[in-house]
Image (cartoon, rainbow, N blue to C red):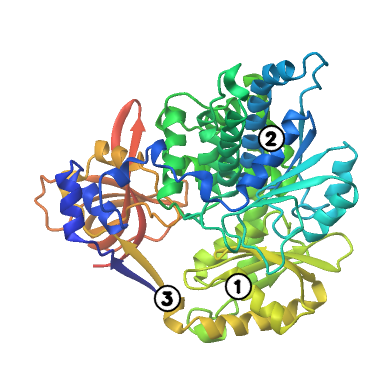
Amino acid sequence: MTHVTTRSYSIVDAEVLQRQGLHPVLARLYAARGVKTVQDTQSLLKQLLPPSTLKGLETATTLLCDALMAGQKIIVVADCDCDGATACAVALRGLRSLNTALQPYRAAQAQPAPASPPSTLDYLVPNRFIHGYGLTPAIVELAAERSPDLIITVDNGIASIEGVEAAQARGIAVLITDHHLPADVLPNAQGIVNPNQIGCPFPSKNLAGVGVIFYVLLALRTALRERGVFEMHAEPRLDHLLDLVALGTVADLVKLDANNRILVTQGLARIRKGILQPGIAALFRIAGRHAAQATAFDLGFALGPRLNAAGRLADMSLGIECLITDDPGRAWALAQTLDTMNKERREIETSMQEEAMEALAQLDIEEDAQQHAALVLFNPRWHQGVIGIVASRLKERFFRPSITLAPADDTNTLAKGSGRSIPGFHLRDALDVVSKRHPDVLITFGGHAMAAGLTLRIEDIPRFSAAFEEVAREQLGPHALERTLETDGELEPAYCTAPFAQQIESIAWGQGFAAPIFAGTFTILSQKLLKDKHLKLQIRTHQAPTNSPLYSAIWFNRTETLPSPAYLAYRLAPDTWNGELRLQFIIEHAQES
């Protein structure tokens, strides 16, 4: 059952925002999300938190400065998702621009002796089906074939104890940049930058991996400036990397706190102005979206999945190459390949979802909530690259922590799992409880509150399922398993316009800063199916005069007709048809009035 509630807000804060010039509805929306002054809505670059309080930053910048000035070989080791791909692209593009700016200085400092050659920069991304995740010993072995002096991890590494040991045994220094939650013991790396490590005073704990490496580059530029490097060369601009930072931040579903909203807002602003990497431009084009009207929704639901498809089905290096190339033709070719992979991913996902629903068909989950506080499903035919999406679909359908598992390799001995959670249930911490109670069940695990991954023996899946269910029952009461849909209440008809919908879409909404959902009672004037799977409606505000405006509405993936009148929860969306800007309601939920 879904309970629809209205999000509360401070009337005083809303009035202050409105007096400061904000649209009255936007003032209410911002106030309901904890914003108190109009300055907090502007998301200006100068409002970014300074890098200085990130623990380990001084060590990291010294390590990088010395490496660049000595002409060392650096390899970036990335994670195989969208955050990892964008973080890798930010690292490579940023380091290359700083390395180029460094050359006149290095040449001058080397007189009369010849200057050492500039640093060489390369990257390596694990194939999740072969190497697993993070800086494993196997990845270090591959990296060692290229003879690096320094490995930089992006969006991974905080759990890579064995990998760091393997690198140091080969004389390779390691700098870890990550945002995942650390375990009790950290790798013995030369440097670690992670806002979530114990003792880090950086106020925002919600940076994505791409945000962490962007901050490291900001600090590195400052350190080079203090060494006098830019006296002979203009400082490179790092704000041109913000399109990548915005994409990775939104796609990784980290909380859009005030600092992350600045990064995303500034990235979107540059995309709309045409300041974007050729690869991102190509991804907008292949997705049928317009960069000039870019939204956070585009980043999360159009670009992100196409990049993730490479890591799920093949090799994320395809996605990284798309993001680091400066050749528009090559970017377009790679975007087409990524699009094809994404279509294949959708087909696999549909098949796996159908099999998952068949497996759950005999369980009356919603009627017997306490017997099924969590879902754990394994299928020997499933593709491990898509299990995370299926877990997400199950979580959305049944509103329970959900973990799906697939064979890790052809030996049928190990399984890889991916989980998604609901509010109030910290998935990574729950796995930690299982691990402590049953030390021999989980081989590896890690992640966040809302998403996590794990590895275990296939023969141990029943034991794990029972242990995970036990933890879920302990932590989730029956009311926690009832879905609550928070709305922003009724919207006055005067504001139900396409221009206002555009204004809403221009704001960086996302995880922890929810996009507005309005609610009200409407008369259903007509309804029909589009493509046999989407419900298309014509509606009018209930009990409004017959000359009141009609609204076009759509409920995606809904086939059952609605009663009239109906209480609808909906989003506003601008819709352009034949060059005409129109308003459309996107229905999220409906119930009898």
Q: Which amino acid type is shown beneath numbered disc 1?
A: Asp
Decide which of 508, 262 is in the foreground and name it.
262
Left or right of 217 on screen, residue 292: left
Decide which of 106, 423 is in the foreground and name it.
106
- Name the secondary structure under disc 3: loop
Q: Return the x and y of residue 226 as percentages of the image width and height.
A: 58, 31
Q: Which mark is residue 284?
A: none
Q: Which mark is residue 429?
A: 1
Give the distance between the C-alpha atoms of the residues marked 1 and 2, in whole angstroms: 37 Å
Q: Is residue 282 visible?
A: yes
Label 1 vs 2, first from the N-terminus = 2
Residue underneath mark 2: 65
Residue 95, by quadrant, is top right
Give the distance between the C-alpha atoms of the residues marked 3 and 2, in whole angstroms: 53 Å
Q: Are marks 1 and 2 in contact (CB under 8 Å)?
A: no
Residue underneath mark 3: 482
Q: Nearer the viewer, mark 3 or mark 2?
A: 2
Q: Return the x and y of residue 21 as percentages of the image width and height.
A: 18, 41
Instruction: Determine the residue located farthest toward the front in the rendered image.
Output: 112
Left or right of 495 on screen, residue 527: right
Q: Return the x and y of residue 553 as percentages of the image width and height.
A: 32, 48
Q: Return the x and y of residue 135 as percentages of the image width and height.
A: 78, 52
Q: Is residue 530 visible?
A: no
- Name the secondary structure under disc 2: helix
Q: Which amino acid type is shown beneath numbered disc 3?
A: Glu
Q: Are marks 1 and 3 in contact (CB under 8 Å)?
A: no
Q: Nearer the viewer, mark 1 or mark 2?
A: 2
